[in-house]
Amino acid sequence: MKYLTDRQAIWLVLLRLVIGWHFLYEGLVKVIDGNWSARAYLFDSQGPFSALFHSIASNDRILSVTDFLNEWGLLLIGLSLILGILSRWASYAGMLMLLFYYLSHPPFPGITYSMPAEGNYFIIDKVAIEFFALGVLSLFPTEQIAGLARFFRGKDQNHE
Amino acid sequence: MNEERKSKGSGGKKISRRDALKGLATVPVAGAVAYGAIRKSHYEHKINRLISDELGMSPAEADYILPPPGSREIRIGIIGFGIRGKQLAQSLGFVHPSLIDDWRAAAAADENDTRYSDFMAQQALNVRITAVCDIFDTYGEMARVAAGNLNREGTGARIADMPRRYLDYRDLIASPDVDAVIVATPDHWHGPMTIEAARAGKHVYCEKPLTWTVEETYQVRKAVRESGIVFQLGHQGRQTASYIKAREALQKNMLGKVTLVEVTTNRNDPNGAWVYPIHESASPDTIDWKQFIGQAPWHDFSLERFFRWRCWWDYSTGLSGDLLTHEYDAINQIMQLGIPHSAMSTGGIYYFNDGRTVPDVLTTVFEFPDRNMSLLYSATLASQMSRGKRIMGHDGYMEIGDTITIFPDAMSTRYAERIAEKVIEPGKPVYSYFPGKKSVDAVSSATERYFAERGLLYTYLGGRRIDTTHLHIREWLEAIRNGTQPGCDIDQGFQEAMTAHMGTLSYKHHKKVFWDGENEKIIV
């Protein structure tokens, strides 16, 4: 990490923390709720992949697995990014989840959703931006700068 | 981190205090997020407890009975196979093969068009259509084919056992292979047909409104009561899950003293204004015009009047009987209002000036002095601004559609303490109900509300939405099998018809009309 200036490092850590914050809060709210389900969101899916998402929503067993993976996936990815442990893997997992969110609700011209967007988007929306930000984090790991990974430095040095 | 872990640091070197701080630096951030989530959950928990414990709203969904296996087959005769008659047959499980073709093509073109799969999934009711009657030859023949389409197939269907088509409804009613009759004719025929069927001991499902004239209303009630048949009036809204929940909310007094209820009709297209298409094969040769006229004043043959009969008082009950009745019946179901003390209507033909005699804009105010409240109905057929149903109480108000949402009133007495504690916030729903959602839940996110309004949250039976007309007919059939009375029985129908007639009479006479409850008479 010597090639990063202090300021670069601080901003990268902050980026990791805010994305982790977002994931962890979404995950916690869903886990605590207990009744949360992605069902309606999936039914709202449109665009070229909507058939896949609709079929997930209409199959109770697949849906319950999807709900579980969503709730705990968000929570654990968020925790990992904030605490700075296995954060590269968390970045990959987060990107995978964001990819699914993006494909289920692509911001393509002519498609409107139940939830009105709070801004105007053409192909790139905030999900896509978060996806690319996680891509950056996966290539510039900062958990050795600030994170629990510092305690495991001996075991896992491959990403330095 | 314990000492052991620390000593395992890089290269076996001890981790310095500085290193440890950097390692743990971000832990408080996770704590902050958790604190936020727990606070949110704590608030929601408090308000949800208020709803379920203090107000006592149950998480229960409406139950829908499944017919017991081995139930007896009911033989049905359908009178009228126009727009509504076709829909009712569909709710029974019978459609013309061409409709199956249309639905399949629509589903192939648009995966969101689920009419075909919904119909195929619709529960079989163990009924047969054994007789049909329509005075328009084309519809009469279509009805026979639909009734014989037992396997719900498209073109090329094996049509077996096509029922007999009767040219006169009296012969259909008299037929020994008919146990029960569905009346889906113009309004001026509802009364006479129901009376005839009741006298013949045939169970009746009659489209709304119950009657065309005030006088018939007494006769129909008398005939149904004396015969002991099972009668259901066609207000399928009775099966709407949100109305059933709204009734519970009122019984739990969530709104406090209710003084005003507002219901509306908002349509804005020719079809909604009853300007229906005229069938190409219709002519004096294919329509029994004399039978159509019945007790209505004579008029020469008119295709407009035949297909668009709702536009003329000669056959119709106008907005009051056609659409107000749905709204009134919903509120009567929720609040058990009964017949109002008075009615005052105004309105006119303001947009569809096409020769019709019934108004296309109507406002009626019904007074219920015993309940200290008014019911306001306002309708236009030339604007689709959706206004829904609103029940206004001192402690809160409720918006009812397919969902219900209850908002606390900022000046509420009942919730004053809770508002002061900030458990309840005026302007934010204190309770929301979406069919299919199992939990008692006050706090619905904006997202959920959007989804619910789009109908994306509904699950009634086995995860799919079910046509309320199907449920309403099913309730009638189960009542026939069990010897009970369904929800929209003749007494509810009597209240509905008298209320609608009061609205119409006030409009026609330009004056307030009254209900004399003791003598059961409308005073104009």
Image: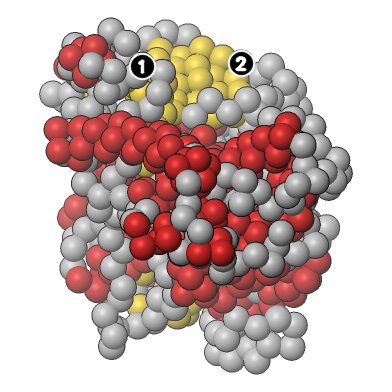
Q: Is residue B321 left or right of residue A46?
A: left
Is the residue marked by circle 1 packed among few (<14), some (14-19), or many (20+) residues within 10 Å?
A: some
Name the subunit of mark 2.
B
Can residue B76 be spotted in the picture? Answer: yes
Number of the label disc, if any, that sits on residue B348? 2
Query: Residue B381 bears which disc, if any?
Result: none
- In the rendered image, the residue lying farthest to the front is B13
Q: Secondary structure at mark 2?
A: strand
The kind of residue tagged 2 is Gly
In the image, is B468 to the left or to the right of B290? left
Q: Say if A9 sits above or below B160 in the image.
A: above
Nearer the observer, B74 or A40: A40
| Label 2 vs 1, first from the N-terminus | 2
Q: What amino acid type should be assigned to the residue bearing mark 1?
A: Pro
* The quadrant where residue B166 appears: bottom right
What residue is at 25 percent from the left and 53 percent from the top?
B60
The residue under the point 23% across, 27% down is B254
Is label 1 in a helix, a strand or a loop?
loop
Q: Is residue B81 above or below residue B55?
A: below
Circle 1 marks a residue in which chain? B
- Residue position marked by numbered label 1 in the rendering: B426
Asked whether the residues under marks 2 and 1 belong to the same chain, the reply is: yes
Q: Position of residue A81 (x, y in %)?
A: 57, 50
Q: Position of residue A11 (x, y in %)?
A: 70, 35
**Residue B103 percent location from the top left of the image:** 71, 69
Q: Residues within 10 Å of mark 2 (few under 14, many from 20)?
A: some
Q: Quadrant of the C terminus of chain B?
A: top left
